[in-house]
Image (tube, rainbow, N blue to C red):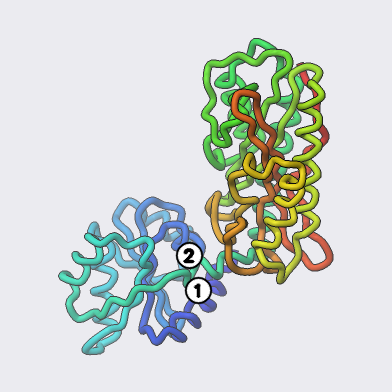
């Protein structure tokens, strides 16, 4: 991963904002800019591209491995010590210091202003997050590998599905397969929703047993090298009823329309509309109540968000999910989701498991 190049690009934005430096406290943004994977760290990024990292004693050895080229400040009161060091190094009477407004709490802001009164704190938004929207080749490779883990785990799970298994047992088995196939961790809490529970988009696995005639929704993903995969498949336990096939075919058409609409420069609201219009035309618009998708990367949900009210356009090299669903209370639901990378000439599909309605058990 080219962390130094990322810091240079972020520093250009810091300079454009008229700041002397940016204090990065979001651990996700810290990892993006430095490679640090611990639980306590902050990065001070100068407008000239220089960087200083702050952490505590627990991570000194780890920093020597993960970011050996970045000067280190070691102190239990990490953020004030890091800013003090920056003030001393600058030798200026005042320092205009940007901070991540969405990640520094009001209490932390007050403590920092009191501890380092010679710093003018300036709120910023999206300096690092905007850079993270477009992934480089190393990041896409990590996402591709994480998605492949999920594909292999699902392939192993499907032959084991049968009536009598509980949602909880299915979820535990799927989680174990994801780890066995090489994930560092789960990408998020696995969703297993059977029968009428499929009408709840984020249903938590319960002790309900699978029965013939159920639709079963599996929403899961692996985390590998910090990057998150996301995939949803809906399968039938036993031969599906006609209404279930019709509902599945509708969502599959909407999902295909969304995938085919992915293109650089496309408004994210237009992408959502491409899939949503298919569902609305069939009379199920109110039963598709969430956005079409979201970006993925070092976080499972990151920019760009894709929904009817979302702003902005798609960028080449940006990974997004396409996940329409229809949810019928008391009956069940269908959701189909892929992770793709926006490309010129057609999106790159990272989750390759079949999207045919599979009958198992």
- The residue carrying pointer 1 sits among few (fewer than 14), some (14 to 19) or many (20 or more) residues within 10 Å by Cα, namely many
Query: 19 above or below 218?
Result: below
Mark pair 1, 2: CA separation: 8 Å
- Tell me residue 161's x, y (percent): 71, 19
Query: Who's the residue at 68% across and 58% down the image?
Result: 140
Classify 212 as above or below 44: above
Q: Relative to 237, does residue 299 appear above or below in the rendering? A: below
Sequence order check, earlier mark of 1 and 2: 1
Residue annotated with mark 1: 7
Q: Which structural element holds mark 2?
A: helix
Q: Position of residue 264 (x, y in %)?
A: 73, 69
Quadrant where the image shows the N terminus:
bottom right
* Label 2 CA crowd tier, 10 Å (few <14, some 14–19, many 20+): many
**Which residue is nearer to you in this view: 3 or 161?**
161
Q: Secondary structure at mark 1?
A: helix
Label 2: which residue? 34
Q: Residue at x 19, y 65 (%)?
A: 111
Q: Quadrant of residue 164?
A: top right
């Amino acid at each position: 991963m080219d962390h130094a190049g990322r810091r240079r690009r972020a520093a250009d934005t810091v300079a454009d904002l008229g700041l002397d430096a940016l204090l990065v406290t979001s651990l996700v943004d810290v990892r993006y800019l430095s490679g640090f994977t611990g639980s306590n760290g902050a990065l001070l990024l100068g407008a000239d591209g220089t960087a200083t990292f702050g952490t505590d004693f627990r991570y000194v050895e780890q920093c020597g491995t993960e970011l050996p080229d970045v000067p280190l400040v070691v102190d239990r009161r990490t953020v004030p010590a890091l800013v003090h060091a920056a003030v001393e190094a600058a030798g200026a009477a005042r320092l205009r210091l940007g901070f991540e407004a969405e990640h520094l709490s009001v209490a932390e802001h007050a403590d920092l202003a009191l501890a380092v009164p010679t710093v003018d704190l300036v709120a910023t938004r999206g300096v690092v997050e905007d850079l993270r929207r477009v992934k480089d080749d190393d990041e896409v490779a990590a996402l591709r590998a994480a998605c492949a883990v999920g594909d292999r785990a699902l392939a192993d799970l499907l032959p084991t599905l049968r009536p009598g298994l509980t949602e909880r047992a299915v979820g535990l088995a799927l989680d174990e397969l994801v780890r066995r196939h090489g994930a560092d961790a789960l990408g998020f809490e696995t969703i297993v929703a059977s029968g009428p529970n499929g009408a709840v988009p984020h249903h938590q696995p319960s002790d309900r047993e699978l029965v013939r005639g159920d639709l079963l929704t599996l929403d899961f993903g692996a985390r590998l090298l910090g990057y998150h995969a996301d995939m949803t498949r809906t399968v039938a336990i036993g031969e599906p009823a006609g209404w279930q096939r019709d509902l599945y075919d509708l969502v599959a058409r909407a999902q295909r329309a969304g995938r085919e609409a992915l293109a650089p420069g496309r408004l994210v609201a237009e992408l959502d509309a491409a899939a949503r219009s298919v569902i609305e035309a069939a009379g199920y618009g109110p039963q598709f109540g969430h956005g079409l998708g979201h970006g993925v990367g070092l976080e499972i949900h990151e920019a760009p968000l894709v929904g009817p009210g979302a702003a902005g356009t798609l960028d080449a090299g940006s990974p997004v999910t396409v996940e329409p669903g229809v949810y019928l209370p008391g009956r069940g639901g269908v959701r189909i989701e892929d992770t793709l990378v926006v490309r010129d000439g057609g999106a790159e599909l990272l989750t390759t498991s079949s999207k045919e309605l599979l009958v198992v058990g």
